[in-house]
Image: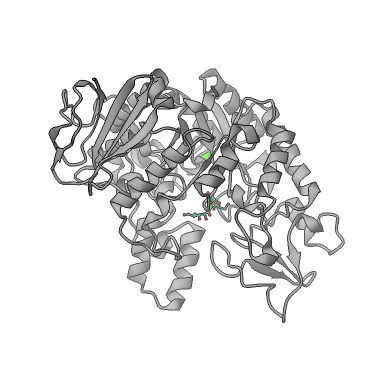
Amino acid sequence: MKWWQNAVIYQVYPRSFQDSNGDGIGDIPGIISRLDYLKYLGVDAIWLSPVYDSPNDDNGYDISDYQAIHPDFGTMEDMDRLIDEAAERGIRIVMDLVVNHTSDEHQWFVESRKSKTNEYRDFYIWRDPVDGGPPNDMEAAFGGSAWEYDEETEQYYLHLFSKKQPDLNWENENVRQSVYDMMNYWLDKGIGGFRMDVIDLIGKLPDEKITSNGPKLHDYLQELHEATLKGRDVMTVGETWGVTPEAAKLYSDPERHELSMVFQFEHIQLDEKSNQSKWDIKEIDFVEWKEVLTKWQIELKDNGWNSLFWNNHDLPRVVSRYGNDSEYRVESAKLFAILLHLMKGTPYIFQGEEIGMTNRTIESIDEVDDIESINMYNERLDEGYTHEELIHVINVKGRDNARTPMQWDDSDQAGFTTGTPWLPVQPNYKEINVEASRDSSDSIFNTYRQLIQLRKHNPLVVWGDYELLLPDHPSVYAYKRSYKGKTWLIVANVSGKVEHLVSNITNSVGDVIVSNYDKESFDPKQSVLQPYEAIVVELLD
Ligand code: TEU
Ligand code: CA
């Protein structure tokens, strides 16, 4: 068994976690000051979103120096101390690895754009104009063409994200070797591994307009493994938006020596109209949602490994998105925790999820920080969308939802900063905060704590087979996990209505293992489920 197979990972978005010096920006000393909290929660590792030097065009996902810490976040000494102090508490630090692209202010790109013969020219993807315009019609994720013209050398460079994020040319062996050297620098510091940003794009063939899953992708990853990860007890998780279960096995089958696991986003994308964008939203079909989650549980059960998540720094808050963030906030937040943490794979908690933090509501585009939302707003306003519909969709899907400051207590600025936070604290912090949650036994926080301990102490949670029950039920999600003759039943009413459940499960039932309604018994043959009720029981013979 690998350490990450019964681990729970906690994602820290450093700008918004804890400020230590009153400049309104979260920082590494701030994270260190909260390690005891994370230890108490019980997590095994922190996935740390980028803390490297960056002009912050995309909040740190545009890196200008992989081996320097952004002064906003602290110094390399602070970083080394974070790794050590976390280790003392049994927590590993998993670094964000953003190597599909760099910042345009990275020294490699500064050199590259100087001349066609510069030794760094081929570190990036440069092409001649075609008919006086860009080489082809590829689009960037943050709007506009993926090609940017550079006057200096009269060629275009490729950027799949913002124009300040030029794509690295992975076909160049020197690029790959430089990335491996940088990775080894971090691995030698004793980090716990890497989360690999949009790693499925590195095998791109821009001339053929192929971006994800290019032909050499897996060769590169095997080479990367050999050069960096081999023989080290670390975990890796690739961010792969376009992955299928078949491809996920290619990444995560241990025999292939690539990655520990990938993030797949199929369940996340079920609220998008087909072949449109994240902003073109539709109602989720609940039965389909269960089917998709089940498919991944079944497909990766033997030769691969799943990551389990509802949230990250790019996604809206789970309780607002799939649950009910007003009347049933506590119940529905616990329900989604229970559903996810009883599945097979490695669960991830995004900061604030463990206290049921909610989406942010804005009225004006001036309130938005995120480049993705701002560019979309401007582009679509020109195309004729109304202000109201655009603000609505930003409130539903925008990335700032996840990025508001962590709510620690009910003091000014929620205990996040003594200054003015870079993004406003949510007005609901007086009620929703760590201090209010930590010491109350029936809090969302304590449900997360309990679920983490269940995984630690029950091999069934880590290894058990998964079976979906009542697949066509329009509001109940029920599944079984079984391992070595033991079976647990998980039942959740994913609706705000009372549900009368009838099933053909004839087993007698053991103790209640988890419940978000304090239930002491449960009859699966026939029962009444309260709004957003979730319960876990053992099935006996
Ligand atoms: O995200 C990948 C990505 O494709 C996002 O643009 C995604 O489509 C969108 O945000 C979903 O809401 C990764 C990082 O997680 C993101 O923060 C970065 O902006 C992006 O890569 C570029 O590095
Ligand atoms: Ca600070």
Q: Above or below — where is 224 with respect to 386?
A: above
Q: Residue at x 56, y 46 (%)?
A: 247
Task: Give the x, y percent position of residue 233.
Answer: 62, 25
The answer to whether 56 appears left or right of 392 in the picture is: right
Instruction: Identify the residue shown where x is 46% and y is 40%.
Output: 299
> In percent of the image, x 61 and y 53: which residue is there?
213
Mark yes or no: residue 69 visible. Answer: yes
> 485 and 405: which one is in front?
485
Q: Nearer the viewer, residue 499 or 196?
A: 499
Residue 128: x %, y % from top left:
76, 72
In front here: 70 or 289? Answer: 289
Query: Is the C terminus in the top left, top right, bottom left or bottom right quadrant?
Result: top left
Relative to 523, say whether 379 is above or below.
Answer: below
Residue drawn 41% across and 50% down? 268
Q: In which quadrant of the rendered image does the N terminus lie? A: top right
- Whether residue 41 is visible: no
In which image quadrant can residue 208 be found? bottom right
Instruction: Pinpoint residue 231: horizontal percent, then vertical percent.
Output: 69, 25
Residue 528 image offset from top left, x and y in percent = 12, 36
Left or right: where does residue 100 sit relative to residue 458?
A: right
Please identify the quarter of the rendering in which residue 207 is found.
bottom right
**Which residue is farthest bottom?**
131
Answer with the quarter of the image where residue 97 lies.
Answer: top right
Color style of the picture: one colour
- Rendered view: 313 above or below 304: below
Count of marks placed on residues: 0
